[in-house]
Image (cartoon, rainbow, N blue to C red):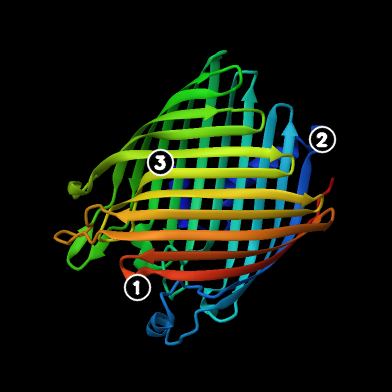
Amino acid sequence: MFLLQACSYPQYRYLGLVTFLAALSASFSAVAASDDVFSPYLDFSVIHEDNLLRFHDAASALAVTGSEVMADTIKRTSAGLRINKIISQQTLIADLSMSRNRYSHFSQYDYAGKDASANWGWQLGSHVSGNLGGSYSEGQTPFQDFRAIEPNINRQRRENFDAAWQFHPSWRVRGGYSQYALAYDLAVLQYNDRKLATTEFGLDFVQPTNSTVGVQLRHIRGDYPNNLIVSIFSVDNNYSQNEFKGKVDWRVSETASIQFLGGLVRKNYDALTKRNFSGTNSRLVANWSASAKLNLNVNAWNEVGSSSDLSANFSTNRGVSSDLGWELASKVRVNASLRGERRDYTGVAAVIGAQALERKDNYTAASIGLSYMPIRHLQLSASLANEALSSNFERNGYRDNKLQFNGRYDLGLD
């Protein structure tokens, strides 16, 4: 299939789907509405982090890198093209960009990033609609995920298709299929390379207010092409996962909504089936626009997730987050976010005979940012963020503070 073949990643191969949609969009330019946009942009950021690699302390940094230096400053320059075209009932959106990232101290991490995404929001008549899309990204693996001193570029690719048919004023059936691939450059992490294929079906009862209540079935097939090698053991992590969930989208008012998705999850491994697990996942999302200038989003979740920790094949994650957006003036906006999550690694060890360590982590993150548009196409912004992890395995803990300045110029043609 196209996704799996593309995992060899020859140069620019990821542009296939994006180029198709962009060309389709351009072919309709003569009949497009006057407010359609083809907009190139330039972006420059300076980011300073006082604990880039998420070390527990300076002694940990010295042991790994030979230096107590933990801080670094990253300069990122990027250029891209955003496309937003409306042709009758069809909406075509694409964003393509490339970036140059330079580290002042840990220069081994310097890299050229690539990002591309495209989506065709299609509609047939008044009752059938859906999306066809894809994305590709190439960049440095976040240090929260893997604290590797060597550079580690990862490549992620996704293609998706979904459709919904409102066959009755009160009933809608929907379905979708997506493929996702993740690959790492660093050899010691290639056991985490994966290809996921997801199929989903749902049935919704639709109320006159557009609130919905329904059920959702999902099947995920996960394939890990490279076995994990630990001592004399080779661990096959291929699996199948099935989910049955209830789904609610309640339009409380014109300015407020609540979404809920929750139900049963079961994951079965092809090998070492003692790792199989089942449980419940649930997520609640609330959105409120207090006014045209003030928006609030709150999330709460209790989910069973996969883990890369060898001592436990899954973790139970419970958390809450909130995001606030406030337009102080016509050209000034404040954004703030808070997040807290408890992670209990209570699954079975991935290695035969190993003892589950029952690791428990507490993760917190907070940020506040200010953006200003002095002229129509120029946006300047600054943000301050804090991230911390505490654990009953003390050396896993860390704290990081980040300060970021950003300037973006949008060369819109409107």
Q: In what element is the residue under mark 1?
A: helix
- Residue where numbered disc 1 is placed: 395
3 or 1: mark nearer the eye: 1
Instruction: Name the residue type under label 2.
Output: Ala
Sequence-earlier tag: 3 or 2: 2
When the figure is inspected, residue 78 is found, relative to residue 395, above or below; the finding is above
- The residue to which callout 2 is attached is 30
Pointer 1 or 2: first along the chain = 2
- Please state if 86 lies on the left or on the right of 201 as rendered: right
Q: Amino acid at mark 3?
A: Ala
- Marked residue nearer the N-terminal end (3 or 1): 3
Residue 289 on image: x %, y % = 67, 38
Q: Position of residue 200 (x, y in %)?
A: 43, 32
Residue, x 68% and y 30% (percent of image)? 90
Quadrant for the N terminus in the image: top left
List the residue tagged with mark 3: 197
> Which residue: 36% across, 60% down?
361
